Image (cartoon, rainbow, N blue to C red):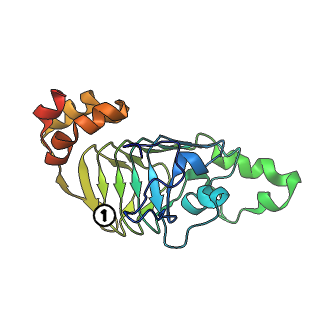
Amino acid sequence: MPFLNADAVHPLTFPDGTVHRDMVHLARVIDHPNIEVGDYSYANDFDPPAPEGWAARLAPYLYPGAPERLRIGRFCQIAHGVRIITASANHAMGGISTYPFGIFDPDTLDLFKEGFAGLPDSEIGHDVWIGHGALILPGARIGSGAIIGAGAVVAGEVPPYTIVAGNPARVIRRRFGEDAVARLLEIGWWDWEPARIRAALPALMAGDVAALAAC
């Protein structure tokens, strides 16, 4: 069995040979024109949908052809119950009523569309861990190496290698100092070939930035 197999739908096999079907490589099960997912990013769900249902499970308001996109980097880890609310889930707030009249009548749809120009994309970097039940709000930008605590409600920007938790999510601490974060982003280990990543595991698991830079 290869160390990393980006082509596998289910990336985890237990020691007894049983495949863990609650966990999927998202890039293998999501085929959606508005969603980009990097290799090795996985989601785990205790009640997993059919393979074609993963896009709707994670981003239930993102429809094909919507004006915004969702981008998820490589090696992300997404726990049960995470939902990513993208920008077109919002209702226009510039008028008197927020009721979406236009979606129920094709003749008035243009009035509805006028309130949704320039919607922001949602961005999740590389190697981001999103904990159980977290809610990612429209237009959130989560930097690589960030950790999102269980149940957190995330809006706006989360800097790289930062731990956030709570509602609204607040910074708990930085995982590394500023210089180390800059070096890690420069290294970009998530773009390495699997053999190089395997050789670098002692440095990756130990949090040794200097040793990782030497790999």
Residue extending furthest toward the front:
16
Direction from residue 154 to residue 72 in the image, left or right: right
Q: Tell me where residue 9 appears, x and y as whole percent.
A: 54, 51
Q: Tell me where residue 200 appears, x and y as whole percent.
A: 22, 36
Q: Tell me where residue 191 appears, x and y as whole percent.
A: 37, 31
Q: Nearer the viewer, residue 17 or 116?
A: 17
- Position of 203 relative to 42 (above/below): above
Q: Nearer the viewer, residue 142 or 99?
A: 142
Q: Tell me where residue 58 appears, x and y as whole percent.
A: 54, 59
Figure disc tally? 1
Residue extending furthest toward the right:
107
- Position of 167 relative to 213 (above/below): below
- Position of 59 relative to 34 (above/below): below
Residue at horizontal 54 percent and vertical 45 percent from the top: 27
The quarter of the rendered structure image containing the C terminus is top left
Residue at horizontal 58 percent and vertical 63 percent from the top: 57
Could you tell me the amino acid type at mark 1?
Answer: Gly
**Whether residue 185 can be seen here:** yes
**Whether residue 89 can be seen here:** no
Direction from residue 177 to residue 105 in the image, left or right: right
Direction from residue 29 to residue 140 in the image, left or right: left
Residue at horizontal 71 percent and vertical 44 percent from the top: 65
Q: Quadrant of residue 149?
A: bottom left
Q: Nearer the viewer, residue 61 or 41?
A: 41
Q: Nearer the viewer, residue 6 or 137?
A: 6
Q: Quadrant of residue 213?
A: top left
Direction from residue 197 to residue 215 in the image, left or right: left
> Badge 1, how many Cα within 10 Å: few under 14, some, many 20+?
many
Query: In what element is the residue under mark 1?
Result: loop
Q: Which residue is mark 1?
A: 149
